[in-house]
Image (cartoon, helix red, strand yellow):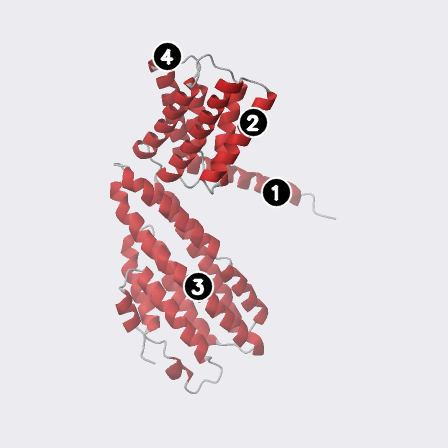
Amino acid sequence: MSDPQTAPVSTGGKARADLRAGVERLRDSAPAIVQIVVAATGAYAFSHFVLGHTAPLLAATVTISSLGLVRDARPRRVLETVIGMVLGILIAEAILLVAGIGWWQLGLTLAASLAVARFLSPQPGFAIAAAIQSAIVMVIPASVPFLRLVDGVVGGIAALLVTALVPRNPVRAVTRDGHELLTAFDAAVLTLVQALRRGDRVRAERGLQKARALQPHVDRWQSSLESGLAIARISPFLRRQRFELQRQERVRAQLDLAVRNLRVIARRVVYVCDDARPRPIAADLLTELAAGARLIGESLDDISFEPPAREAVRVVAARLDPVALAAGRQSLDQNLVGALRPLAVDLMTAAGMPAADARAALPRV
């Protein structure tokens, strides 16, 4: 029987975890919420008070749908969504003018909106956005033709304006994604180090699995960086953040290569652990490279960590001579040491060292 005293603790721990997750989601989405509220209310107010529209529903719905709470807030993505929705409104207004309102007119409008939008864009969301807005036009009657098209255009313009003038701060999200990658990278390296120290093939295979699972982290970081850089190019309030975003893009590009090389290393570790012999020297070298990677992670918050990160990896790189390290040591695999060399170069360049200097830091072989 289970201890009844442990159940409330477990339930309470889950409740606290859920609460923390909810607070974190709210905190991360707060800038997007502000954007949506400002844009939707502004578009509605403009259509109602300035243009005299009685109930400018689409001015608000177009704004809300085009901005959304998604991670990717690039102006191009917002513009594409706006175009899709305005296209759906235009098709619906045209069919409504010719055929009127009814169940078959709704079906015809949805079919036309989906077909035209799918033809124009490879993005499924583009077609869905067009269909939703066209359905709203067909279901909710209006006295003046194409009035809602004007509301949709107003909502789209409002969405684009707040993207530039009330921008979401991209650096926080970008830095968080970078930390997630480096944390997962460190976990994969730690597992491989443990496998080398114990000669444990099962643990080595687990490390290989972790290394293979790193690519989604790289892709998320790249997506948030592309979004942040696109916003910073058009927003006058984010121009000072361009340097930081460009620096992190340089770090990401090199860590992408480091992740690929780590997978090569992990496959070699699986192979060498097949004989169940410990390999402490290789484990020590990989541990020191991981320490340099952790300093790179610190540099995402504070650029002053880049010089010690470069130096930490350079010290290890200077010893990566497969022939010299293998002299008199039968357990040391030269191919594994050779695989560590490109990883060291990637980490040094991620920390800001020129590629030529990083390669020169390695012993000649």
Q: Residue at x 47, y 43 (%)?
A: 122
- Vertical side of 250 occupied by 226: above or below: above
Separation (CA) of disc 1 from disc 4: 59 Å
Mark 2 belongs to which amino acid? Leu
Of the residues tagged 4 and 2, which is closer to the observer? 2
**Residue at the front extreme of this rendering:** 98
According to the picture, the residue beneath numbered tag 4 turns out to be 52
Mark 3 belongs to which amino acid? Arg
Separation (CA) of disc 1 from disc 2: 57 Å
In the rendering, which numbered label is found on residue 108?
2
Any part of residue 129 in sight:
yes
According to the picture, the residue beneath numbered tag 1 turns out to be 9
In the rendered structure, which disc, 3 or 4, sits on the residue that comes first in sequence?
Answer: 4
Residue 99 place in picture, x, y as percent: 53, 19
Mark 1 belongs to which amino acid? Val
In the rendering, which numbered label is found on residue 220?
none
Of the residues tagged 3 and 4, which is closer to the observer? 4
Please, what secondary structure does the residue beneath circle 2 have?
Answer: helix
Quarter-wise, where is residue 203 in the image?
Answer: bottom right
Front residue (pair 43, 124) = 124
Mark 4 belongs to which amino acid? Gly
Separation (CA) of disc 4 from disc 2: 31 Å
According to the picture, the residue beneath numbered tag 3 turns out to be 260
Any part of residue 74 in sight:
no
**Residue at the right extreme of this rendering:** 1
Front residue (pair 129, 341) = 129
